[in-house]
């Protein structure tokens, strides 16, 4: 499988449009952002080049390609305020496989390995992430990669007519 990764340094309208499509996909919304209620779950947002440029001020973003097709995006932040463990030198990561045709093929695992290596190059020693308790395939992926649960935050996100926990995981690298 031809998987490539590219650091995003200069957003384009095409990239912003693709990310907006994924971030507003009803199948992905419950997996990629916390929602306090049904209205929040149904909210849709626009994403401009300027929005992406603003994200790049604190996010290190990488595009995921499957062949020539943009299939996903991943990012990390250094010491963001939403870390559960406030340890200096920690990265917070996120991975989104936006194209359905790229899911379930090991793309997420390879993306995670690549992202960990990029974080190592920055001299960081710890990674933390959050995953909603109903996202069992992502939980298995992170466990397989050596992440361990450190806490659960109750009533964190709304989906399927109820509130769910956010599972926080970490890995020392």
Image (cartoon, grey):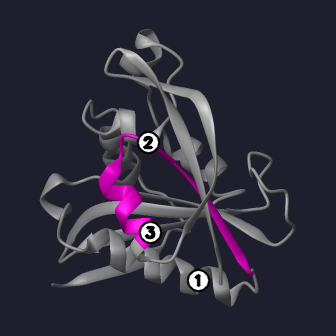
List the residue tagged with mark 3.
143
Which-is-in-front pick, marks 1 and 3?
3
Q: Residue at x 39, y 49 (%)?
A: 13
Q: Position of residue 47 (x, y in %)?
A: 46, 37
List the residue tagged with mark 2.
133
The residues bearing labels 2 and 1 have C-alpha atoms spaced at a distance of: 27 Å
List the residue tagged with mark 1.
118
Taking the image as shown, residue 74 lies to the left or right of residue 83, namely left
Q: Position of residue 34 (x, y in %)?
A: 52, 31
The residues bearing labels 3 and 2 have C-alpha atoms spaced at a distance of: 13 Å
Magenta residue check for 8:
no
Structural crowding at the residue carrying mark 2, measured as other residues with C-alpha within 10 Å and reported as few (<14), some (14–19) or many (≥20): some
Answer whether residue 96 is visible to the viewer in this image. no
**Which sits earlier in the primary sequence, circle 3 or circle 2?**
2
Q: Residue at x 57, y 42 (%)?
A: 51
Q: Position of residue 28 (x, y in %)?
A: 31, 39
At mark 3, the secondary structure is helix
The residues bearing labels 1 and 3 have C-alpha atoms spaced at a distance of: 20 Å
Q: Is residue 54 above or below residue 67?
A: above
Q: Is residue 158 above or below residue 147?
A: above
The foreground one among 60 and 117 is: 117
Structural crowding at the residue carrying mark 1, measured as other residues with C-alpha within 10 Å and reported as few (<14), some (14–19) or many (≥20): some
The foreground one among 53 and 130 is: 130
Q: Is residue 37 above or below residue 11?
A: above
Answer whether residue 70 is visible to the viewer in this image. yes
Q: Residue at x 31, y 43 (%)?
A: 22
Which-is-in-front pick, marks 2 and 1?
2
Locate the C terminus by quadrant: bottom right
**Which sits earlier in the primary sequence, circle 2 or circle 1?**
1
The span picked out in magenta is: 125-143
Structural crowding at the residue carrying mark 3, measured as other residues with C-alpha within 10 Å and reported as few (<14), some (14–19) or many (≥20): some
């Amino acid at each position: 499988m031809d998987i490539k990764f590219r650091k995003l340094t200069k957003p384009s309208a095409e990239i912003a449009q693709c990310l907006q499509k994924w971030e507003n996909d009803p199948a992905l919304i419950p997996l990629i952002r916390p929602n306090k209620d049904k209205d929040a779950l149904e909210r849709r947002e626009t994403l401009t080049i300027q929005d992406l440029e603003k994200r790049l001020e604190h996010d290190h973003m990488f595009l995921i390609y499957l062949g020539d097709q943009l299939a996903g995006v991943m990012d990390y932040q250094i010491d963001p305020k939403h870390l559960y463990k406030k340890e200096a030198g920690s990265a917070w990561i996120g991975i989104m496989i936006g194209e359905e045709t790229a899911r379930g093929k090991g793309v997420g695992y390879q993306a995670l390995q690549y992202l960990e290596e990029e974080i190592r190059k920055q001299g960081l020693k710890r990674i933390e992430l959050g995953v909603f308790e109903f996202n069992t395939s992502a939980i298995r992926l992170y466990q397989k990669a050596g992440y361990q649960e450190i806490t659960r935050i109750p009533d964190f996100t709304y989906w399927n007519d109820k509130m769910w926990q956010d599972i926080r995981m970490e890995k020392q690298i």
